Amino acid sequence: MTPIVSVLMTAFNREKYIGQAIESVLASTLPNFELIIVDDQSHDRTLEIARSYAAKDERVRVFRNEVNLGDYPNRNKAASYAKGKYIKYLDSDDLIYPHGLEVMVGAMEAFSHAGYGLSSNPDLNNFYPACVSPKEAYLEHFFTGFGHFNRSPGSSIIRTDIFHKVDGFSGRRMIGDYEMWFKLSQENYLVKFPRDLVWHRAHENQESQSAYATQYANLRQQVLEEALHSEKCPLSQDEIKRLRKQLAKHNSKQKILKFASKFSAFLK
């Protein structure tokens, strides 16, 4: 039977966590899935552990890259193996709750015209799942506190055909997900469903703890500017002008707070 969803798990030196991550998927209340694990030339027992699960459950398929690809290129590689109608990323150090796949797939099936879905902040005006147009997704992200595009890959589920239509992740380090949500929402409807379907682990070996992470704010700004200058941006010029005023006000406030914090520390 063809799986309705392909769970994609990329891995590099995650022997400490990958067993738990795999087991969380296998405990899903939605049985019709495949779990694709792509090892990116790990130096520890990650591949061995993954293969041990594949030997016991035919829904688990394990691949190993010939060379180390890095985070987002490896996510694209994993997607190339997918057979499901949807792809669902789960990092090899995170856990998905038993009902997570069922909720996400059910939300997407309820809105067949949508291209992807994201865990969303609560909406006091709508019962989840809810579906919004490209323009609504942009406006909600910037103006109503939803912050849709601040989600990680693990918070998403994407129609496989739509993922390939936009050529997957660009490969840009650390901000590939932020960039992807802008790109998907240029022409695709977004399904909103509740948060906390995936447990995101925090530890010292994550890239967010690396020296490269100091560039994150600047990288985000680059992605934002590209999205607003794109011919496919669903916002009108008046809405973009209003947004820029709001962002300028926010940046000024942040600079004042940063200065006040440094001045306070100096006085101590």
Image (cartoon, rainbow, N blue to C red):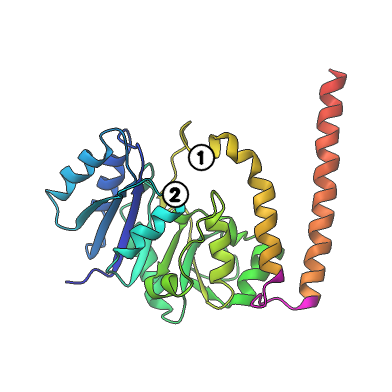
Tally of numbered discs? 2
Q: Residue furthest front?
A: 67
Query: Magenta segment: does it hold 259?
Result: no
Considering the whole magenta stretch, tell me its main secondary structure: loop
Q: Is residue 94 above or below residue 237?
A: above
Q: Is residue 244 above or below residue 173?
A: below
Q: Which residue lies under the disc numbered 2? A: 71
In the image, what residue type sits under mark 1? Glu
Which quadrant: the N terminus? Answer: bottom left
Left or right, 225 with reference to 75: right
- Determine whether the residue tagged by mark 2 lies in a helix, strand or loop: helix
Q: Nearer the viewer, residue 94 or 207?
A: 207
Q: Which residues are magenta?
A: 229-237
Crowd tier of the residue under label 1, counting other residues whose Cα lies within 10 Å: few below 14, some 14–19, many 20 or above: few
Left or right, 73 with reference to 241: left
- Determine whether the residue tagged by mark 1 lies in a helix, strand or loop: helix
Q: Residue furthest top?
A: 268
Q: Is residue 252 visible?
A: yes
Q: Is residue 144 visible?
A: no
In the image, what residue type sits under mark 2? Asp
Crowd tier of the residue under label 2, counting other residues whose Cα lies within 10 Å: few below 14, some 14–19, many 20 or above: some
Nearest to N terminus: mark 1 or mark 2: 2
Query: Magenta segment: does it hold 233?
Result: yes
Q: Is residue 170 above or below residue 14?
A: below
Q: Nearer the viewer, residue 78 or 243?
A: 78
Give the x, y percent position of residue 142.
69, 63
Give the x, y percent position of residue 258.
80, 37
Q: Residue at x 29, y 32 (%)?
A: 44
Q: Which residue lies under the disc numbered 1? A: 207
Give the x, y percent position of residue 177.
52, 57
Instruction: Tell me whether circle 1 and circle 2 mark residues in contact (CB < 8 Å).
Output: yes
